[in-house]
Amino acid sequence: MGKCLPSPELLNKILKYNPETGELFWRKRDIGLFKEGKKSASHACNAWNAKNANKPAFTADDSHGYKHGRIFGAAYQAHRVAWAMSSGEWPPEFIDHINGVKNDNRISNLRLASFTDNNRNMRKSRRNTSGCVGVFFHKTTGKWIASIGHNARNVHLGYFENFDEAVYARKSAEVKYGYHKNHGLNMQKPSVLLG
């Protein structure tokens, strides 16, 4: 069973989200969010606010390049928190970063997506050597091969004498199969936006 998600109302009570920059900040907390323990709730509240209130939240990077942080000990991704705070509900599936920059959490850069939609808007892999996703040189035949993923299978698009023909076949297939226009781009900075 998954973790119980904090309500969007609670998120907006404990966090501030700037939709223009995508940044999250901790709000000052009231004593009602703290329990009596080894230290009094008042002491815990004052200590937490002195350390965190009005400071950036969700600043850590996970192993995939997404910003993340913790709320009451449970880990969450910043883009999912931002979506919940803005829309009033947690996303049912994936949140896609439209420009491919995983830490650009501006609301204008986020969209609801299915697993397939999310995969159809991925950056070019660092392992890609041809410069175009789905195009590679086949040494045995001396030709370029183009392929694309569709309906959970690899669709062979053909062998081509030159790179440009293979790229054209791949890009045409991306349009045919509904890939996002940013798919395969190597976006690095949020200042370079395409959509």
Image: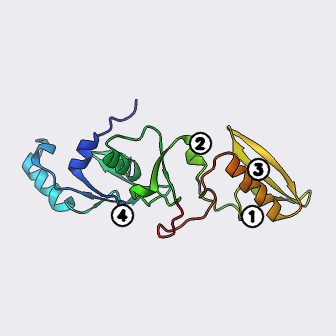
Q: Residue at x 16, y 57 (%)?
A: 49
Q: Tag 3: Cα neighbours inside 10 Å, few (<14), some, or many (≥20)? A: many
The residue indicated by pointer 3 is 147
Residue 147 picture location, percent across and down: 76, 50
**Counting residues from the N terminus, which is met first, the one under dot 3 or under dot 1?**
1
Q: Tag 2: Cα neighbours inside 10 Å, few (<14), some, or many (≥20)? A: some
Q: Tag 4: Cα neighbours inside 10 Å, few (<14), some, or many (≥20)? A: few
Question: Given the image, on which type of amino acid does mark 4 rest?
Answer: Thr
Task: State how far apart marks 2 and 3 are (Cα).
Answer: 17 Å
Give the number of the mark in front: 3 or 1: 3
**Counting residues from the N terminus, which is met first, the one under dot 1 or under dot 4?**
4
* Element class at badge 3: strand
Residue 97 picture location, percent across and down: 49, 54
User: Residue 166 occupies which quadrant of the picture?
Assistant: bottom right
Q: Residue at x 32, y 38 (%)?
A: 5
* Element class at badge 2: helix
